[in-house]
């Protein structure tokens, strides 16, 4: 596998959970769950993305830069990506886990009508996804995700 200074990834339909966690780690990871193999290969080439797949036949296609994910276990899948492509180019929790867009910092006033009142009272830092409109803040789920992300850290 080539060394990518800033790899852009495309996960196929078998790797949706991996795609979400790669985004949380800071990898630019597109995800397709409805494309045919031909469409995946075309998009990967057109966008200069490394295709992540568990499909051996698809991974062997000529002219396609791909990474065959061998494991069925999430933690090992993350390790496979990190070993082949290096650490994530962006900081963890900097991308939308749903649509992959880079999050923007916003003030409490900007999102006051989009979060529960108790969140406004107890938090001061918010991020907004300009792609899908989700608002993120550091709740207890972030601590849980951070612990999981640490488990995925370089060995």
Image (cartoon, rainbow, N blue to C red):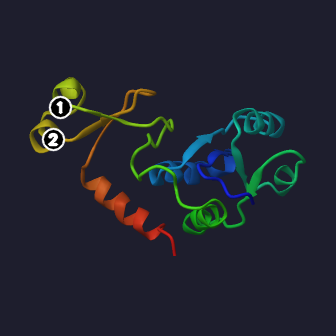
Residue 115 quadrant:
top left
Q: Would you call the spot at circle 1 few (<14 residues within 10 Å), some (14-19), or many (20 or more)?
A: some
29 left or right of 112 in image: right
* Circle 2 residue: 124
Estimate the x, y position of residue 114 in percent, counting from the top left.
25, 27
The residue shown at (57%, 49%) is: 19
Nearest the camera: 147 or 44? Answer: 44
Q: Residue furthest right?
A: 62
Quarter that holds the N terminus: bottom right
Q: How far apart, in angstroms, are the residues tagged by discs 2 and 1?
A: 7 Å
Q: Is residue 84 left or right of residue 139?
A: right
Residue 62 numbered mark, or none: none
User: Image check: 112 left or right of 3?
Assistant: left
Q: Earlier in the sequence, mark 2 or mark 1?
A: 1
**Which secondary structure, mark 2?**
loop
The outermost residue toward the front is 5
Callout 2–callout 1 Cβ contact below 8 Å: yes
Residue 31 horizontal/vertical position (percent): 62, 41
In the image, residue 6 sits, relative to residue 79, either above or below, namely above
Q: Report the number of discs.
A: 2
User: In which quadrant of the rendered view does residue 120 lie?
Assistant: top left
Q: Residue furthest left?
A: 121
Residue 89 position, x and y percent, is: 51, 51
Question: Which residue does the image show at 18% across and 27% down from the upper left?
Answer: 112
Residue at the image point whose x is 50% and y is 35% from the top? 99
Sort mark 2 into few (<14), some (14-19) or many (20+) by Cα contacts within 10 Å.
Answer: few
Image vertical order of residue 41 relative to residue 1, above or below:
above
What is the number of the mark on residue 108? 1
| Residue 34 locus on image (x, y percent) | 70, 35
- Helix, strand, or loop for circle 1? helix
Foreground: 126 or 8? 8
Q: Residue at x 52, y 55 (%)?
A: 88
């Amino acid at each position: 596998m080539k060394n990518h200074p800033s790899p852009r990834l495309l996960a196929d339909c078998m790797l949706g959970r991996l795609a979400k966690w790669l985004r949380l780690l800071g990898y630019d990871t597109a995800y397709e769950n409805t494309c045919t193999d031909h469409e995946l290969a075309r998009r990967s080439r057109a966008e200069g993305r490394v295709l992540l797949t568990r499909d051996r036949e698809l991974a062997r296609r000529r002219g396609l830069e791909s990474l065959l994910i061998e494991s069925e276990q999430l933690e090992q899948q993350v390790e496979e990506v990190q070993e082949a492509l290096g650490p994530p180019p962006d900081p963890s929790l900097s991308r939308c886990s749903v649509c992959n867009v880079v999050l923007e910092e916003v003030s409490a006033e900007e999102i006051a009508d989009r979060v529960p009142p108790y969140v406004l009272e107890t938090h001061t830092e918010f991020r907004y996804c300009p792609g899908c409109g989700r608002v993120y803040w550091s709740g207890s789920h972030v601590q849980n995700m951070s612990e999981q992300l640490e488990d995925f850290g370089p060995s």
